[in-house]
Amino acid sequence: VTKRILTGIKPTGTPHVGNWVGAIRPALQLVDRHDGSATAMYFIADYHALTQVHDRAKLADYTYEVAATWLALGLDPERVLFYRQSDVPEIFELAWILTCFTPKGWANKAHAYKAALDASRARGEADLDAGISMGVYSYPTLMAADILAFDTDLVPVGKDQVQHIEIARDLADRINHQYQQPVLKPPLAVVGEDTAVVPGVDGQKMSKSYDNTILLFAEEKALRKRVNQFKTDSLPPEAPKDPSTSALFQLYSAVATKAEAAALAERYRAGIGWGDAKKLLADRLDAELAPARARYAALMGDRPQIDALLGIGARRAREIAGGVLDRVRAATGIGARR
Ligand code: TRP
């Protein structure tokens, strides 16, 4: 039996090197590892992004940028079902049905909502809930629908998302128990082994919210300029450097082979100027990304092609979800004529 692997990608920003190393590259490797024994479904979670992005042009641009990025980096739409969440209305229909089975107490404890509460608290708001939409509150229920609409077996996610997968699992169990039949398949989270921390130009974890990212497909000149902004100390060029405390080195080893990283570590210990270290990192990033950058530019110049590819995925996804929804309607009595 082939297992179904599914994960969602939230289009809330222009993809950066941290997204690639932390999420895109491992997800594409997972497809290769499971070739034949699993079917993968990777989708653009634009309804989830709408909980954060309320600028029409940005939401559209991020959606295309994220789609073009995955395709440029090697996602093969023949092997992976690749679609927009909002093109599969069955997901949304299931989301409401699941909402009717989600205890409000689960939503109170969910990670996305608690993170939003923390942000309200940090802003010093008097009413912590005032700025939080029902979309954020219902985030895990929509996510459960993403997963359960396709009889998903495995959901590769980061640690912060495991709780949301458990909610999907608990919802499937609840509905199966309520109707005394196997209506929905309880999924399992798969947490990848800890990928190395990808530092941004300030040395902190690379993240859009720290404004320290290196965009994946910036032009070569912009890429080099950004790498030159990496913070370094004032050791003279000939002084030995400790690779383990250098963000430049950490990022290099996240991109290069083990042998290349070992060779560079040697040069750090022997004494390397920061200017040279930056140049080596920029060269390595550029070598790795230049071919994909060209594919990305071609795709972004032809949005109808991206739409066509996503549309093929959506049609196949709708067939699968349609079957699951038939089961859910039959079990719950929704839409029954008698
Ligand atoms: N919430 C996930 C994130 O922030 C994205 C996501 C949406 C997702 N729906 C999903 C992940 C379904 C796995 C399965 O990264």
Image (cartoon, helix red, strand yellow):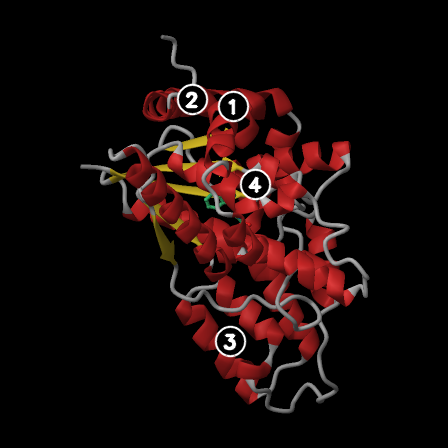
* Residue at the spot 74% in from the left edge and 65% down from the top edge: 121
Front-lying residue, 254 or 330: 330
Between marks 3 and 2 in the image, the one whose residue lies nearer the viewer: 2
Question: Does the closest atom of ligand 1 sit within 8 Å of the Cβ of label 3?
Answer: no
Measured Cα–Cα span from mark 3 to mark 4 = 29 Å
In screen coordinates, is 253 left or right of 172? right
Instruction: Name the N-terminal-most of marks 3 and 4.
Output: 4
Find residue 89 and name its label: 1
Mark 2 — residue?
318
Q: Badge 4, how many Cα within 10 Å: few under 14, some, many 20+? A: many
Where residue 81 sits, quadrant-wise, is top left
- Are the residues flagged by discs 4 and 1 in contact, CB closer than 8 Å? no
**Residue 33 horizontal/vertical position (percent):** 29, 48
Measured Cα–Cα span from mark 2 to mark 1 = 8 Å
In screen coordinates, is 178 left or right of 268? left
SS for callout 2? helix
Where residue 236 sits, quadrant-wise, is bottom right
Where residue 225 sits, quadrant-wise, is bottom right
Front-lying residue, 19 or 116: 116
* Residue at the spot 72% in from the left edge and 75% down from the top edge: 231
- Identify residue type, mark 1: Pro
In screen coordinates, is 327 left or right of 36? right
Between marks 2 and 1 in the image, the one whose residue lies nearer the viewer: 1
Mark 4 — residue?
69
Find residue 264 and name its label: 3
